[in-house]
Image: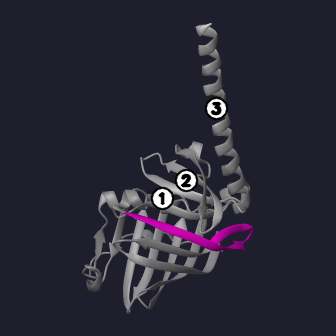
Amino acid sequence: MKTNTFLATAAAVIFSITAHAQTVDEIVDKHVAAVGGMDKINGVKTLYTERSLSVQGMDIPSKTTIVVGKSMRSESSIMGNAMVQVIDGTSGWMIRPAMMGGSGEPEEIPADMVKQQLGQLDPFGPIVNYKEKGSKVELVGKEKVDGKDAYHLKVTTKDGQVMDQFLDANSYLISKIKMNINGQPGEMSLGDYKEVEGLKFANTMEMMNEQAGNLVFTTNKVTINGPVDDTIFKKPAKK
């Protein structure tokens, strides 16, 4: 009798795990479809975006060029001073003006900071193709985000980074992300999705972090598969 009870319990646990995994996969599949479908996502090789950042009453223009899975260059202008950040493979460099603690000359980005930035080489995030990427996705439950139902997914990337992603229960698009930003807990709210060549991108992103404060990004332009000159990722010599 005890054996039968044990087998029944074990079967129930296995069924529960299987059902749970299917639920996660179903949610992820609907998210992929909502973004535009795997074929279109896989077809993106380069991505160029222009955004404006609103912080402390200032509007800071920025532009980012990504060669998916390989390289990223982000440029912004702060009170007439150029700020550049580049990730190329597993290394990176940046140019910071004096007002940002730099010298205006190119400098190496510390390895731990590069590791945190590698996720930017994947513009569609870790839950798309998560199994192939070596990520783990768990369904925490259904919660309210800004008054709307959302699926709460706990995501652990291959390199051990942990984040919480919230997918709107109606659109299946990401509405909020919680994760550590520069060692401090922070969150980002995403909304006003716009379609570009059959793919949806968040038009507004609001980042909240104790260290950085509230940062609001507005997307002004998105170009998919435009030409990219690889030399923009090469570290220039010091003047």
**Relative depth, front residue between 22 and 46:** 22
Nearest to the eye among marks 1 and 3: give it: 3
Query: Residue 230, how many percent across, how many down?
Result: 49, 69
Q: Residue at x 58, y 70 (%)?
A: 190
Q: Circle 2 sits on which residue? A: 126
Q: Which mark is residue 200?
A: none
Q: Circle 1 sits on which residue? A: 119
**Relative depth, front residue between 231 and 49:** 49
The relative height of residue 228 versus residue 150 in the rendered view (above or below) is below
Query: Residue 237, how many percent across, how many down?
Result: 30, 75
**Relative depth, front residue between 25 and 86:** 25
Mark found first going from the N terminus, 1 or 3: 3
Mark found first going from the N terminus, 2 or 3: 3
Dominant SS of magenta comes to strand
Stretch in magenta: 185-202
Residue 208 occupies which quadrant of the picture? bottom left
Quarter that holds the C terminus? bottom left
Label 3 crowding class (10 Å Cα cut-off): few <14, some 14-19, many 20+? few
Q: CA distance from mark 2 to mark 3?
A: 24 Å
Q: Residue at x 31, y 79 (%)?
A: 96
Q: Circle 3 sits on which residue? A: 16
Q: Residue at x 68, y 35 (%)?
A: 19
State if disc 2 and disc 1 touch (CB < 8 Å): yes
Q: Residue furthest front?
A: 1
Q: Amino acid at mark 3?
A: Ser
